[in-house]
Amino acid sequence: HQQQQQSKRRWQEHYVEPPCPFVSTGYTSTLATLLSGQPREDMPPLLLVYLHSPLHRQSTEALRNLLCNGNILNLLNTQSGEGNVICFGANVHTPDGARLRDLFGVVAFPFLALVSVKSTGRRRSPSGGGSGNGGNGDNNSNGDNDANGTGNNNNGNHSNVDLNNLQIDLHLRLEGSALLSPPLLSPSNSTSNSNQIHTHLLATLNHHTQLRTETLRRRLARQEEIRLRQEQDREYQEALLADQLREIARREEEESARREEEEREERERRKVEEEESKLAKARSLLEFAGEPPAGGTVARVRFTLPNGKKVDRRFHPGNNLKAVYAFLTVYFHEEGVELKNFGLSTNFPKRSFSLEEEGEKTLEEVGLCPQAVVMVQDLDA
């Protein structure tokens, strides 16, 4: 007896019952979970459906030999953990079980199927589990029933998936004799049959996983293409904006240069007009003053230019200093001397003349009569 107790304790210490891969929610909630939480263009996980008929005398034995098989349990738990399959089971005597029995047209039990479910309608705001042509059935007054057929209401606003429009594609279907043929029930063949079921499930799940991976790859490639196109568009818009800003700056620069040129030309025009007006006034004044003949009472003035050239000119003693400036202005113009702003001074006595202050004084008053040597200075030099 003591040895039996020790063996029992060792068995309890080392044996861990594998978790059940089947969900405990009702069919509608299971569909909502399957279809929500992922991009619409991605493939959702497969749905494994097991329908159990307790009145069928061999269903329990098949359940024990197949779905409780260690390899199949490990496969379903692994695939479920990786998000490749969701397992749902129901008693055919519950509303969910009856609904699925009618949907798949099941006439033999037990029933096992792997299906893909796709929503063909628009996503909507949560409003509870509806009914539709995709096998969801009409709204049941009992709500979503859990897998053991207790009729627990699992309605919840946890999904915005439209369950009224579903497309269900069958990938693997095993029922009745395919699961319960006489050789399958014999203990010697149960392992062989479970291996065959395991092989079918594994092949179907692997194929679907490859399709999901390829779909994901394509979606990511499209997203990357869209991202690159958006980045190129952004760079193009930035380049276009930079070109527009450069064009605006160029036009503003050209406009500024044009205005500056117009202002320069206007200054030049005014300067020319002022010089022409000044020259005309000088000629008029010089013509009015005249040059007296040699001999008699005159004021003889010798001008020494900045380049050293000497210029002699006779003036009436009563001419004012403006006549002297007028003579030099006309002389410089006629001789092509570029001297516009000039001043006059004498060395003996040493003094400088101011046109603004002394322009109206006569030559006698400023000391240039009867003769004088006047130095001409370039005030712009």
Image (cartoon, rainbow, N blue to C red):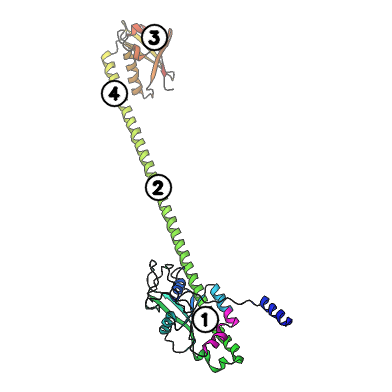
What residue appears at the point 45 percent right and 68 percent down from the top-left corner? 39
Amino acid carrying label 2: it is: Leu
Question: Pointer 4 and pointer 1: residues touching (CB < 8 Å)?
Answer: no
Real-space Cα distance between discs 3 and 4? Answer: 29 Å
Quarter of the image containing the C terminus? top left
Element marked by disc 2: helix
Real-space Cα distance between discs 4 and 1? Answer: 107 Å
Instruction: Return the mark for residue 372.
Output: 3
Q: Start and end of the magenta stretch?
A: 55-73
Indicate which disc, 1 or 3, sits on the residue closer to the N terminus.
1
Real-space Cα distance between discs 3 and 2? Answer: 68 Å
Question: Pointer 1 and pointer 2: residues touching (CB < 8 Å)?
Answer: no
Element marked by disc 4: helix
Real-space Cα distance between discs 1 and 3? Answer: 127 Å
Q: Which residue is mark 2?
A: 245
Q: Which residue is mark 4?
A: 277
> Mark 1, mark 2: which one is toward the viewer?
1
Main SS of the magenta part reads helix
Vertical placement of residue 294 versus 273, above or below: above
